[in-house]
Amino acid sequence: MRQNQVSYPGLFITFEGGDSCGKSTQVALTHEWLKSRGVTPVLTREPGGTDLGEKLRELILHGPDDMDPRTEALLYSAQRSYHMATKVLPALEAGEVVLQDRYLDSSVAYQGAARALGVEEILELNLWAVKGLVPDVTILLDVDPEIAYARRTGEPDRLEREPNSFQHRVRKQYEELARRYSDRYHIVDASKSIDEIQTEIQQILTPFLEDRLSGANR
Ligand code: TYD
C-alpha cells in the first residue's frame, strides 16, 4: 500500500540502517545491478544529494560539538525538503527509479529516538518538510552495533563519536519503524556476507521492478 499523499509513475527506494551497517556498499552494488539490467536509477543520498545538501552535510557532520539537537534535526529536515523538491520528486514524476541512501526514517531513528527529541514530533516535522512523500520500498540493513563498530574505517564524524548506546537506540527505533510500516519495510540481516546481502536485496526489489528490468544477465 502506498501511503503517499503524492502520486507519481516512478519508484522510490530507500536504504536505511545504523552507522557502518554496510549500506553504502549495498547501495553501490544495487546501482550496478540495476544498470546491468537496463535500469538507470537516480542515485542519491542524504544528507546531501544536491549542492545545497552537500554543503549542509559538511556543516551537520563536521560542525560544532555544541550543536543543539534541535538545530541538527532542523538542518537534516532542511536539506531533505530541498532534495525532495528539486531532485527526488521531479525524478519520480518523470517515471524514474530513485535509489536513495537514507531518508526521513534516519531522522526518526537518530534525532527522534537516539537524540530523544520525540519520534512523533520528528516524523511530523519531516513529513511536513517533504509534503508527505514516503518511499515505496525501504531496505533496512539490520546488524548489531558492536559488529558494525568493528567494521568502521576512517575518522569518525560527529554522529559516529556518540557512545554505543546511541547506536542501540537507533537500531531499536528502526525495528519499530519496520513494524509500523511493514508494507514498505524489508529487513535484511546485515551480518551476512556482502554477496548474500546483495542477493537478498535483488530478490526483494525484483517484483517492484519486473516491468522495467531487461532480460540481460538474468
Ligand atoms: P554517512 O557518512 O552518510 O553515514 P552512513 O554511511 O552511515 O549513512 O553519515 C550520515 C550520518 O548522519 C549517519 O551517522 C546518520 C546520520 N543521519 C541522521 O542522524 N539523521 C538523518 O536524517 C540522516 C539522513 C542521517
Image: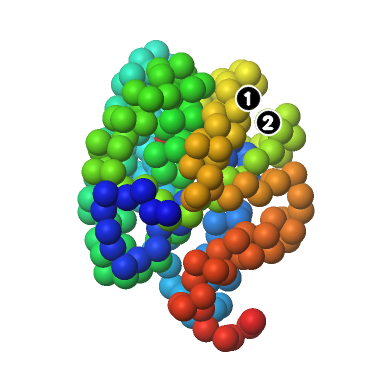
Question: Mark 2 is on which residue type?
Answer: Pro
Task: Tell me residue 179's x, y (percent).
Answer: 55, 38
Q: Where the C terminus falls, by quadrant?
A: bottom right
Outermost residue toward the bottom in this view: 215
Task: Tell me residue 112's x, y (percent).
Answer: 43, 24
- Residue 78 in the image: above or below residue 83: above
Residue at 31% from the left image edge and 56% from the top image edge: 88
Task: Tell me residue 145's x, y (percent).
Answer: 68, 31
Residue wearing tag 2: 145
- Residue in the foreground of this view, choosing between 25 and 214: 214
Question: Mark 1 is on which residue type?
Answer: His
Q: Which of disc 1 and disc 2 is earlier in sequence?
A: 2
Q: Residues within 10 Å of mark 1 (few under 14, many from 20)?
A: some
Residue wearing tag 1: 168
Left or right of residue 158: residue 22: right
Residue at 25% from the left image edge and 38% from the top image edge: 129
Residue at 55% from the left image edge and 60% from the top image edge: 28
Left or right of residue 54: residue 168: right
Task: Tell me residue 10's x, y (percent).
Answer: 35, 66
- Residue 197 in the image: above or below residue 149: below
Local secondary structure at mark 1: helix
Which quarter of the figure has residue 27? Answer: bottom right
Left or right of residue 63: residue 17: right
Residue at 51% from the left image edge and 75% from the top image edge: 210
**Callouts 2 and 1 close, C-beta under 8 Å:** yes
Separation of residues labelled 2 and 1 (CA atoms): 6 Å
- Residue in the foreground of this view, choosing between 57 and 83: 83
Could one spot residue 52 in this view of the protein? Answer: no
Which quarter of the figure has residue 79? Answer: top left
